[in-house]
């Protein structure tokens, strides 16, 4: 996802400065574009196209900015900006997510799926008892 100059200027002011020291960080604009690509498409981090920094870099920065509240501030500012322009109405809002609960009796199946996932290139681990059903790596 490519950001326009106007979009980047809006977001850039909210991104913390590079703390310095150590290795030089990837360009924040490219990282945010990678993060937005994953959020927009719903794809796995490891499916991030090569035109962006590595998925590990984008994921790590996303988690860092999420913990520091940067992502939240960007979204809140964006919503206020869109409300002022009359482009969004939050009187009625929907959030959509699709997950299926992994039943306790399905441990063997879960193990099979995890094994199949690892054989296709490990890009993440299961960290909850809920598995996203939109994950392409489980399709037959």
Image (cartoon, grey):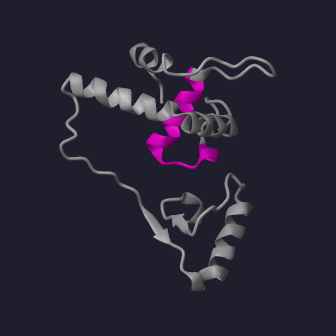
User: Is residue 128 on the magenta stretch?
Assistant: no
Residue in the picture at 49% in, 33% down: 71
Q: Residue furthest front?
A: 68
Out of 47 and 33, give the one closest to the viewer: 33
Out of 63 and 31, give the one closest to the viewer: 63
Picture quadrant where residue 31 is located: top right
Q: Is residue 23 above or below residue 123?
A: above
Out of 66 and 42, give the one closest to the viewer: 66
Picture quadrant where residue 30 is located: top right
User: Is residue 41 on the magenta stretch?
Assistant: yes
Residue in the picture at 54% in, 80% down: 103
Q: Is residue 17 above or below residue 73?
A: above
Q: In the rendered picture of this protein, how many numbered marks are placed on residues?
A: 0
Left or right: 40 in relation to 89: right
Left or right: 87 in relation to 68: left
User: Magenta region's main secondary structure?
Assistant: helix
Query: At which x and y percent is residue 19?
Result: 70, 19
Q: Residue furthest bottom?
A: 105
Q: Is residue 95 above or below residue 132?
A: above
Query: At which x and y percent is residue 47?
Result: 61, 45
Query: At which x and y percent is residue 13?
Result: 48, 16
Q: Quadrant of the C terminus?
A: bottom right
Left or right: 89 in relation to 112: left
Left or right: 25 in relation to 90: right
Query: At which x and y percent is residue 86?
Result: 18, 26
Residue in the picture at 66% in, 38% down: 60
Q: Is residue 39 above or below residue 107?
A: above
Tell me where the magenta segment starts and ends, as one range: 29-47
């Amino acid at each position: 996802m490519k950001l326009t100059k106007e979009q980047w200027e809006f977001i850039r002011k909210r991104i913390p400065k590079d703390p310095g020291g150590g290795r030089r960080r990837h360009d924040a604009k490219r990282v945010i574009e990678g993060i937005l690509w994953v959020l927009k498409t719903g794809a796995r981090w490891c499916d991030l196209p090569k035109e962006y920094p590595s998925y590990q870099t984008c994921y790590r920065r996303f988690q860092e900015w999420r913990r520091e509240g940067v992502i939240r501030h960007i979204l809140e500012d964006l919503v206020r900006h869109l409300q002022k322009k009359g482009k969004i109405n939050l009187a009625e809002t929907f959030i959509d997510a699709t997950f299926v609960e992994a039943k306790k009796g399905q441990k063997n199946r879960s193990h099979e799926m995890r094994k199949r996932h690892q054989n296709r290139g490990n890009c993440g681990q299961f960290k909850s008892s809920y598995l996203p059903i939109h994950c392409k790596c489980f399709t037959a």
